[in-house]
């Protein structure tokens, strides 16, 4: 056989090996990816906090838990759609566990007020965890049980733990809201204190 044939064979082998390596990396990355959908009042707040958390790969603000398909922000604000404002988080569970994500969740909103977060009142602001698997359900229930037994809060936790059904992404101007509107009064007066609280309590979970 000619040397040209062996050169071609070698090139093909290197290409195939590189392809397998790339595919393996994609597979491993996908293997550790997980989604959880959380409602803790206004999604502008929760989105801003979780953007700072290590292991969080992607966040989308939107709506879940209701009966209206593809609702608008205005429709959800009416309180008539059954939806809650939520964020859908994609995270790398080799970098951060669901338990750690929920520790943050229960620290940056009040899980003891039914259908209310501060001045935001209505079922759209309810505290809710939409689980994507039975393991997530058990994890959420265990975290809630431990918090209730520890009496960290003056009142029992009212956070709903319900199966995830469907997620509707909110309009573009509601994505990445805090970073795009840092000087808005709501961002300065409501979101920034939550970020400061997160930074104080969870230095070990912050993105570097």
Image (tube, grey):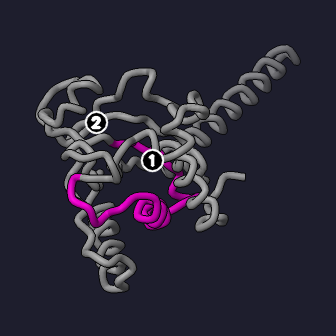
Q: Locate residue 151: give its quadrant.
A: bottom left
Q: Residue 29, can we see it? A: no
Task: Indicate whether 126 appears above or below 183.
Answer: below
Mark 1, other Cα within 10 Å: few <14 / some 14–19 / many ≥20: many
Q: Is residue 17 magenta?
A: no
Q: Quadrant of the N terminus?
A: top right
User: At which x and y percent is residue 208?
Assistant: 73, 52
Q: Is residue 107 magenta?
A: yes
Q: Which residue is mark 1?
A: 46
Residue at 50% of width from left, 52% of height from top?
A: 32
Q: Residue 5, can we see it? A: yes
Nearer the observer, 9 or 34? 34
Mark 2, other Cα within 10 Å: few <14 / some 14–19 / many ≥20: many
Task: Indicate whether 188 appears above or below 135.
Answer: above
Task: From the viewer's perspective, tell me whether residue 21 is left or right of residue 170.
Answer: right
Q: Locate residue 12: give its quadrant.
A: top right
- First reached walking from the N terminus: tag 2 or tag 1: 1
**C-alpha separation, residue under disc 2 versus residue under disc 1:** 13 Å
Residue at 14% of width from left, 33% of height from top?
A: 81
Residue at 48% of width from left, 61% of height from top?
A: 104
Task: From the viewer's perspective, tell me whether residue 147 is left or right of residue 192.
Answer: left
Nearer the observer, 18 or 27? 27
Task: Indicate whether 154 appears above or below 22.
Answer: below
The region drawn magenta spans 86-115
Q: Which residue is mark 2?
A: 63
């Amino acid at each position: 056989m000619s040397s040209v044939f062996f050169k071609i064979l070698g090139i093909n082998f290197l290409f195939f090996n590189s392809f397998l390596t790339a595919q393996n990396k994609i597979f491993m990355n996908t293997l550790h990816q997980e989604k959880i959908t959380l409602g803790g009042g206004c999604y502008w707040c929760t989105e801003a906090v979780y953007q700072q958390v290590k292991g969080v790969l992607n966040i989308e603000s939107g709506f879940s838990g209701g009966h209206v398909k593809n609702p608008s922000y205005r429709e959800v604000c009416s309180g008539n759609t059954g939806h809650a404002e939520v964020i859908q988080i994609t995270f790398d569970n080799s970098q951060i566990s669901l338990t750690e994500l929920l520790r943050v969740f229960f620290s940056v909103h009040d899980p003891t007020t039914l259908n209310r977060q501060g001045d935001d009142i209505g079922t759209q602001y309810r505290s809710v965890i939409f689980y994507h698997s039975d393991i997530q359900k058990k994890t959420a229930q265990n975290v809630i049980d431990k918090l209730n037994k520890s009496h960290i809060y003056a009142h029992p936790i009212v956070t709903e733990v319900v199966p995830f059904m469907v997620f509707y992404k909110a309009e573009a101007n509601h994505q990445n809201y805090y970073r795009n509107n840092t000087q808005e009064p709501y961002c300065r007066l409501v979101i920034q204190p939550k970020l400061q609280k997160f930074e104080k309590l969870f230095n070990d979970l912050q993105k570097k």
